[in-house]
Amino acid sequence: MNAARNIKAAIGALTEIGLMLLALAIVCALLVGNNLPFFGSVVSNITALVSELGKNGLVGLIALGIILWLFSKRTMA
C-alpha cells in the first residue's frame, strides 16, 4: 500500500511540474513570440485544442470537464 502511495505522489509531482512548465511556456510565448526553441508553439497548440473541443459541442464540453477534473487539486489520502 505504501508503494502505491509513493507512485501516486510521484505522478502528482510530475503533473505539477508539467503544469508549471506549461504556464512558463505560455508566458514566454506571450513575451517573446509564438515559436520558442525549447517550448515550441504552445499557444497555437492550446488554441487548436480549444477549437477542436468547441467544434464537438456537448462531447467537447464533457471532455473539457473530465480534463479539468483530472487536473483539479485533490488531497492525497
Image (tube, rainbow, N blue to C red):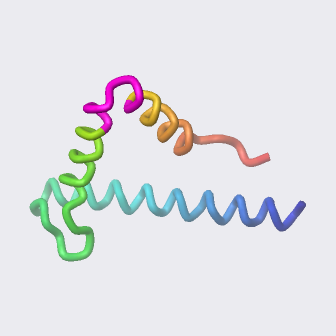
For image coordinates 27% across by 49% down, the residue present is 46
For image coordinates 55% across by 37% down, the residue present is 69
Q: Is residue 75 left or right of residue 48?
A: right
Which one is in front, 61 or 30? 61
Q: Position of residue 24 (x, y in %)?
A: 31, 59
- Magenta span: chief secondary structure: helix
Which one is in front, 63 or 16? 63
Does 13 appear above or below 56? below
For image coordinates 22% across by 45% down, the residue present is 47
Residue 56: say if magenta.
yes
Examine the image and state in which quarter residue 9 appears: bottom right
Q: Which residues are magenta?
A: 53-60
Residue 39: say if magenta.
no
Does 16 appear above or below 58? below
Q: Position of residue 15 (x, y in %)?
A: 53, 58
For image coordinates 24% across by 54% down, the residue present is 45
The residue positioned farthest toward the right in the image shown? 1
Does 38 appear above or below 52? below
Q: Position of residue 20 (x, y in %)?
A: 42, 58
The residue positioned farthest toward the bottom in the image shown? 37
Examine the image and state in which quarter residue 53 appears: top left
